[in-house]
Amino acid sequence: MVDLPYETLLGVSYGLLVGFVPALAVGSIAAVIGFVRDRSIPVAAGVLTVPIAVATVVVVGVGGSGSSLAQVYRLSMVALVAGLLGAVATSHGNRIATELPRDRASPIVRGPTLSADAIDAVDAIGQVTIRPTGAIREFDGYPPLSPALRSTLEEGAWRFPADLQLVELEARLERRLRTEHELAQVDVSVDGRGRATIAAAPPAKGVATTLDAGDRAVTVTGLLPTGLAPGDTVVVGDDEAAVDGEVLAIDDEPIRQSERDRDERAGPVSAREHRRADAGTDGGERRLTVAVETTDAGTLLGESTRRISVRPTGANHEFEAAALLEATGRPVTALEPADDDALEPDATLGVRTGDRWQFAVGDSVPDGVDRAFVAESPRSTREVTSDD
């Protein structure tokens, strides 16, 4: 006589015990095949767990006790439970394979861009004009902006690609302002309508900013040769006490004899009164600011007038190369390209992307170029720039 409740409980227990691991394996295989090959495995494939579970029970010998009828009933319950576990595991494996994301690339998170009002003002080449709004703010701890520079910034207008994010527009405008006006500090905020709020600090152009460590700036008076310009190397003094120095600045006006005593009492001329243009001086008796070593600075102090002569520095090969290119009809030009694809790699000498300059760009021009030096004909140059 078969005790059905007992044999049922025993068969279910054995089925759960020996059918769990095969069912887990079948479910994992279904998930892998469904994800890799994009196809589902039939739920009936879960019955593969049945022979594995029954064979495990027979080999281990846990179902060998009792009559033959009781053993058959017990193994039947093991097969039923193992088959159900396999079917459920296969179904879950197919569902997991369907729900897993197939595009494993990182999602592109785009920031805010210009609003529709600003997009309507885009020109034919896809650029929008950014204009300042309100007064130009100042940074604490920096001197105020000059009226001319403040007016230039308030009346300025800058063009950028309209599809850029606001963050990128702000970064590009900051770099352009810092480069064009040599600002010591700048902060830009652009709203969705293309209006920029600008905070700026004036450029630091004092003499101290041009000195290297261990150098001192000394202002001397002497007869300057015509064509002398900042950056030239000069010898100040006579043969007994000659000091080499680099020209930092040259006074704009010649010294009159009636003003010499007053100027000597007033001390060195301000850096704002010095000429820093690339064009040389007209010559004559003038004040000259030179950078000399600290140990030589005391030698130049004391006498009112010094003899000044210029040392030869050799040919400027950079200027010679630029002159040769210009003679062949391909002058070197600095420009801000409207489109990176418009730049020819063979004609591009250097590009600036962000805060980094790259020269010898090779076969392709990098993306996001803010400024470039090209050696092309004037007509080709006009084609890659936009009119402000």
Image (tube, rainbow, N blue to C red):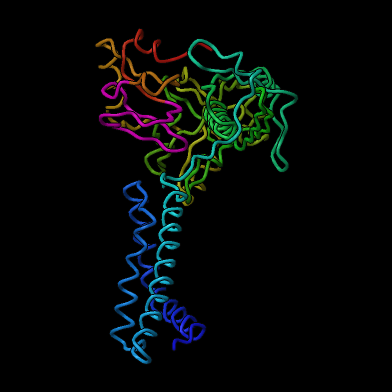
- Would residue 210 be counted in the magenta stretch? no
**Picture quarter with the C terminus:** top right
Residue 48, x across and y down, in percent:
32, 65
Q: Is residue 227 visible?
A: yes
Residue 271, x across and y down, in percent:
59, 32
Q: Is residue 140 above or below residue 6?
A: above
Extreme-top residue of the structure: 379
- The segment highlighted magenta reads 344-371
Quarter residue 324 falls in:
top left
Residue 295, x across and y down, in percent:
47, 52
**Picture quarter with the N terminus:** bottom left
Q: At 31% across and 18% down in the image, what residue appears?
A: 375
Q: In the depicted view, which residue is nearer to us: 344 or 228?
A: 344
Q: Is residue 9 above or below residue 96?
A: below
Q: Is residue 280 above or below residue 201?
A: above
Q: In the depicted view, which residue is nearer to us: 161 or 28?
A: 28
Quarter residue 51 falls in:
bottom left
Residue 195, x across and y down, in percent:
67, 23
Q: At 54% across and 36% down in the image, what residue appears?
A: 110
Quarter residue 310 falls in:
top left
Q: At 48% across and 80% down in the image, what residue appears?
A: 8
